Image: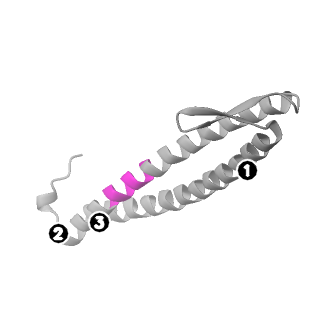
Amino acid sequence: MTINLDQLDEETKKKFQNLTQLGQSLELLTQQKLQIDSTIRETEIALEELEKANPDTVVYKQIGGILVKSERNKLLDEKKSDKETLNMRSNTLAQKIERTKSTFENMQKSLQADLQNQ
């Protein structure tokens, strides 16, 4: 079913535009969550490797495009902190995605009802 926006009243056009924008927001939020979840997995791998290493092992961390010598325990603490922050962001995004999905579904039902009544 194709929708000709020219045949719709202004209120229905506005609802359709809002639904489209909300769908785009939902897609963007989902992409952001996937990126953060990927970074969490990378951080977990780095943590595993750091935990396997001896405390006196020479380790490096990346700052921009260069590697800088660091202490294992200090880097381990940094990575744990990074993981916590990333997990909080991921959880927040998951909540936003759920709220946005719910709003999207409600708007979609409302728009469908409007279109059936025209």
**Could you say where residue 67 lies in the image, as x and y percent from the top left?**
62, 31
Span shown in magenta? 19-27
How packed mark 1 is, by other alpha carbons closer than 10 Å (few <14, some 14-19, many 20 or more), is: few
- Pointer 3 or 1: first along the chain: 3
- Numbered disc in front, either 3 or 1: 1
Disc 3 + disc 2, Cβ < 8 Å = no
- Numbered disc in front, either 2 or 1: 1
Is the magenta region chiefly helix, strand or loop? helix
Q: Residue at x 76, y 36 (%)?
A: 47
Distance of mark 3 from mark 1, alpha carbons?
Answer: 43 Å
**Could you say where residue 55 lies in the image, as x and y percent from the top left?**
88, 33
- Pointer 2 or 1: first along the chain: 2
Quadrant where the C terminus sits is: bottom left
Q: Residue furthest left?
A: 6
Give, as a three-letter code, the residue at label 2: Asp
Say which of 117 and 98 sits in front.
98
How packed mark 2 is, by other alpha carbons closer than 10 Å (few <14, some 14-19, many 20 or more), is: few
Colour mode of the rendering = one colour
Q: Secondary structure at mark 1?
A: helix
Looking at the image, is 41 positioned above or below residue 88?
above
Which residue is the site of mark 1? 81
Q: In the rendered structure, find residue 9 and report the number of the disc placed on it.
A: 2
Q: Is residue 22 magenta?
A: yes
Q: Residue at x 43, y 48 (%)?
A: 27
Q: Residue at x 40, y 55 (%)?
A: 25
Q: In the rendered structure, find residue 15 and report the number of the disc placed on it.
A: 3
- Pointer 3 or 2: first along the chain: 2
Lateral position of residue 41 relative to residue 15, left or right: right
The answer to which image quadrant residue 52 occupies is top right
Looking at the image, is 62 positioned above or below residue 112?
above
Give, as a three-letter code, the residue at label 3: Lys
